Image (cartoon, rainbow, N blue to C red):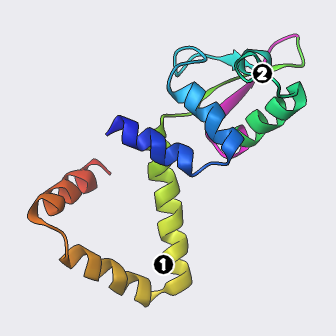
Amino acid sequence: MEGEDLERAVGLLGPLEGRIMRLVWTGTIGEPSAAFTVRDMQALLPGLAYTTVMTTLRRLADKGLLVAEATVGRRAYSYRAAGGPGRFLAEASARETRAFVDRYGEAALAAFAVHLDSLTPAERRRLEELAKRQ
């Protein structure tokens, strides 16, 4: 399940954002919760300009995937993962579900109901387990 979450999460991001978050979430840059700098990340992405990596890390922080922290006495920032791929998927799916229902209203709710009716007993049990964790 963890690998599936990683692939799904990376697939929701742009190509460079996905490459960076894969490095962060898999621990390639260090422990997934460890802090790193633009230079640390740039070392793993040869051929990319410092400013390209810096801009992408800033955007990932703006999206809530990374936490940016100012380094005392320096203009540089350090970054760390705000959470894992599962957390990102949960937040993204909640946001997209709200947007879907806002856009389609009752038609969206009816579509969800039809889908729920087609679940197998095992899928229903899994859905109940997941709902309890929320």
Q: Which residues are magenta?
A: 61-73
Task: Report whether 51 appears left or right of 33.
Answer: right
Q: Quadrant of the N terminus?
A: top left
Q: Residue at x 20, y 51 (%)?
A: 129
Residue bearing mark 2: 46
User: Which of 26 and 106 lies nearest the eye of the viewer?
Assistant: 26
Give the mark nearer the N terminus: 1 vs 2: 2
Q: Amino acid at mark 2?
A: Pro
User: Is 68 within the magenta?
Assistant: yes
What residue sits 38% from the left and 36% below the top?
3
Which numbered mark, 1 or 2, is in the foreground of this view? 2
Q: Residue furthest top?
A: 73
Would you call the spot at circle 1 few (<14 residues within 10 Å), some (14-19), or many (20 or more)? some
Locate residue 109: give its quadrant.
bottom left
Measuring 55% from the left and 72% from the top, which residue is drawn there? 99
**How far across and down, in percent of the image, does residue 74 sit?**
88, 13
x and y percentages locating residue 113 in the rendered image: 28, 80
39 above or below 67?
Answer: above
Name the residue that disc number 1 marks.
Answer: 101
User: How would you rate the neighbour count of disc 2 (Cα within 10 Å): few for under 14, some for 14-19, many for 20 or more?
Assistant: few
Q: Is residue 57 left or right of residue 127?
A: right
- SS label for mark 1: helix
Q: Measured from the top left, where is residue 25 in percent x and y? A: 52, 29
Q: CA distance from mark 1 to mark 2?
A: 43 Å
54 part of magenta stretch: no
Q: Which amino acid does the dot numbered 1 rest on?
A: Val
